[in-house]
Image: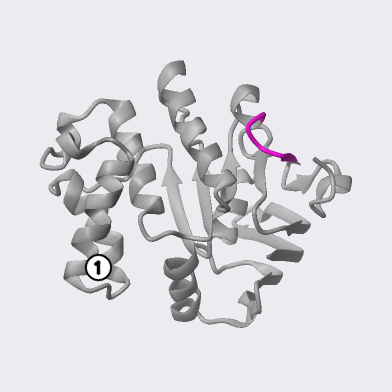
Amino acid sequence: MITLSNVEKVYQTRAGKTWVLRRINLEIQAGEFVTIMGPSGAGKSTLLAILGMLDGAWGGEYRFLEHQVHRLDNRRRLALHKQFFGFVFQQYHLIDDLTVAENLDLPLSYRDVKRSERQAMVADTLDRFQIVAKKDLFPSQLSGGQQQLVAVARAVIGQPQVILADEPVGSLHTDQGRMIMDLLARLNREGTTILQVTHNPEWAAYGSRTINLKDGWLVDPDVVTGTRH
């Protein structure tokens, strides 16, 4: 599904080049639940942004399904992102002046889904995530766990093939975190490919495979092909 070949990310500073990722070679199969771990500054979030096509300033080759991502311009990469990917951020990134229902509707509006279809999909998602009673509330009226639940619902409402989760439960207490992780695990069992960044070994264990980064390098090259579980 995903193949990275010698992917690198570098920033040019006054002091010279600062490498964020170095020679990343990685394969991810459809239906995997992959955890990305490593110390702060290892390049985890940068790798996730590249995988999710939110970052186009890098070198190397990236193939997603039949698409050669490294040959696409920003417009075409963004179109692929909208079509195939859902993103869950640690800080939720909900729109403060939109209700829960309106936040869920937003990514569908970007995809030119008809209004009647969007309303039905929002209703189904509210029911699936058991947040029907919250649909007219604003993010500020929700607890942290409820906000993250809405963020996950927003990420999956368009039925993406891949969910990218960057420290999705890092700011939640244990019970809330376990609720979110159980939900991601269920989505994975239903066929969604999950890529998560985490520092927490308990959350990492939800994945079928762990990739370790250090100073921008893959620490264990034996786990890059998706053959070890």
Figure check: 100 above or below 202: below
**Is the C terminus in the top left, top right, bottom left or bottom right quadrant?**
top right
Q: Position of residue 207 (x, y in %)?
A: 66, 37
Q: Residue at x 59, y 56 (%)?
A: 13
Residue type at tag 1: Ser
Q: Which of 95 and 21 is in front in this view?
A: 95
Q: Is residue 51 left or right of residue 222?
A: left
Is residue 87 among what the camera can see?
Answer: yes
**Residue stretch in magenta:** 205-211
Label 1 Cα neighbours within 10 Å, binned few <14 / some 14-19 / many ≥20: few
Q: Which residue is drawn at 20% across and 37% down?
A: 139
Place residue 7 in its image quadrant.
Answer: bottom right
Q: Position of residue 217 (x, y in %)?
A: 77, 47
Q: In this view, does 146 lie to the left or right of 32?
A: left
Check the image and name the residue furthest to the right: 222
Query: Which residue does the numbered mark 1 point to in the structure image?
Result: 109
Q: Residue at x 59, y 59 (%)?
A: 51
